[in-house]
Amino acid sequence: MEMTWEIKGNELFIGVKGKLDTLSAMNLDDKMNELPEEVTSIYFDFEGLEYISSAGLRILYWVIEYVEEKGGNTSVKNVSDSVLEVFEVTGFKNMIKIE
């Protein structure tokens, strides 16, 4: 998995490519634990994300809850058909804004 991470004010932009599987989800989780308190909105760019596992979905769920508590926004963009199918089957399509 390749990941980019950019904070602009209270917004965090995360780019994820490759596979968000159990091992890479742990890396993302570690990074999310370093999240500065001032971040209230988180935006994902999934261009090049080929696969998301249940571990990746757990991280995404945590992000949704975190952002809701802060009163911010969260969204994903450039979602592949295979990842979108996982979102549909698991109900994530109704939980997060997909651009």
Image: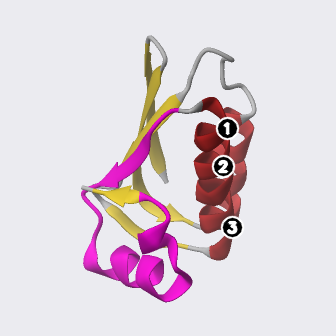
Measuring from the top left, give residue 21's x and y in whole percent: 60, 67
Mark 1 or mark 3: whose residue is earlier in sequence: 3
Residue shown at the point (56%, 33%) measured from the top left: 71
Q: Which residue, given by chain and number where applicable, does mark 1 sit on?
A: 69
Say which quadrant the C terminus sits in: bottom left
In the image, residue 34 above or below residue 15: above
Q: Is residue 75 located in the magenta-colored stretch of the structure?
A: yes
Q: Which residue, given by chain and number where applicable, does mark 3 sit on?
A: 55
Q: Which residue lies furthest to the bottom in this view?
A: 89
Residue 53 showing in the rendered view: yes
Mark 3 or mark 2: whose residue is earlier in sequence: 3
Residue shown at the point (68%, 17%) measured from the top left: 37
In the image, residue 75 above or below residue 48: above
Tell me the number on the disc at residue 85: none
**Figure quadrant of residue 38:** top right
Dot 2 falls on a residue whose secondary structure is helix
Q: Nearer the viewer, residue 53 or 10?
A: 10
**Figure quadrant of residue 47:** bottom left
User: Disc 1, disc 2: CB below 8 Å?
Assistant: yes
Single out the mark in the foreground, 3 or 2: 2
Q: Which residue, given by chain and number where applicable, does mark 2 sit on?
A: 65
Measuring from the top left, give residue 57's x and y in whole percent: 60, 66
In the image, residue 89 above or below residue 70: below
Task: Report, in whole angstroms, how far the alpha carbon at label 1 lies from the one at label 3.
Answer: 21 Å
Magenta segment, which residues? 72-96
Task: Report, in whole angstroms, how far the alpha carbon at label 1 lies from the one at label 2.
Answer: 6 Å
Measuring from the top left, give residue 82's x and y in whole percent: 34, 81
